[in-house]
Amino acid sequence: MQTKLSWKKNFFSGLYTIYSNSQQIGELKDVPFTQTATGELNGKKYIFKAIGFFKQRTDIIDVAENKVIGVITYNDWMTKASISVNNETINWKYDNWLSTKWSIFSSKGIKIQYSGSSTTGQIDSNVDDPLLLLSGLYVTNYYWQTTIAVLVAVFVPLWTVVLH
């Protein structure tokens, strides 16, 4: 089943709004200061909770069952990730060096392609799986936030030195 969706987000916002044919069908929202995001798509609700400090992973919690149903692990270079759900590993990766295209794929034929900027984007998928569709946005948002945090940690001390 071919699925085509779009998403919108304000530049400094932690809320992705997901649309099908211009009608809102879901969202992915950061919960400030908690390393947690909530996602809902087509009535399915999930919580993405980052665990750890240096070597983080993210637990995926099904809200209806109130249990962990998957785990996202990240590589050290912030270019790839693995989503483990139902004893299956689905891969996430950037498809270009500008980080404006990324995809999720598996050896079983799952293929979800994302493209976008910091405020809008498209999703083309051969599966209609709310968890995987949301996970692709979550990983990208996670890497974007991590990059911003690193830049702030590096440049704020440098900036204060330059000003003195």
Image (cartoon, rainbow, N blue to C red):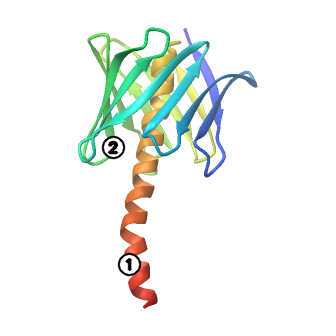
Q: Quadrant of residue 151?
A: bottom left
Residue at position x 45%, y 35% in the image: 36
Q: Which residue is mark 1?
A: 158
Farthest residue toward the right?
A: 22
Q: Is residue 75 left or right of residue 59?
A: left
Residue at position x 38%, y 78% in the image: 158
Q: Secondary structure at mark 1?
A: helix
The C terminus: image quadrant = bottom left
Pointer 2 local density, CA inside 10 Å: few below 14, some 14–19, many at least 20:
some
Q: Indicate the position of residue 79 as horizontal and vertical percent values.
A: 33, 43
Q: Amino acid at mark 2?
A: Thr
Q: Indicate the position of residue 53 as horizontal and vertical percent values.
A: 28, 45
Q: Is residue 35 above or below residue 156?
A: above
Label 1–label 2 contact, CB within 8 A:
no
Q: Is residue 7 above or below residue 63?
A: below
The one of 53 and 127 positioned closer to us in this rendering: 53
Q: Is residue 130 left or right of residue 108?
A: right
Q: Is residue 128 left or right of residue 107?
A: right
* Comes first in the chain, label 1 or label 2: 2
The one of 10 and 51 positioned closer to us in this rendering: 51
Pointer 1 local density, CA inside 10 Å: few below 14, some 14–19, many at least 20:
few
Farthest residue toward the bottom?
A: 164
Q: Which residue is mark 2?
A: 79
Q: Secondary structure at mark 2?
A: loop
Residue 55, disc? none
The one of 12 and 52 positioned closer to us in this rendering: 52
Q: CA distance from mark 1 to mark 2?
A: 26 Å
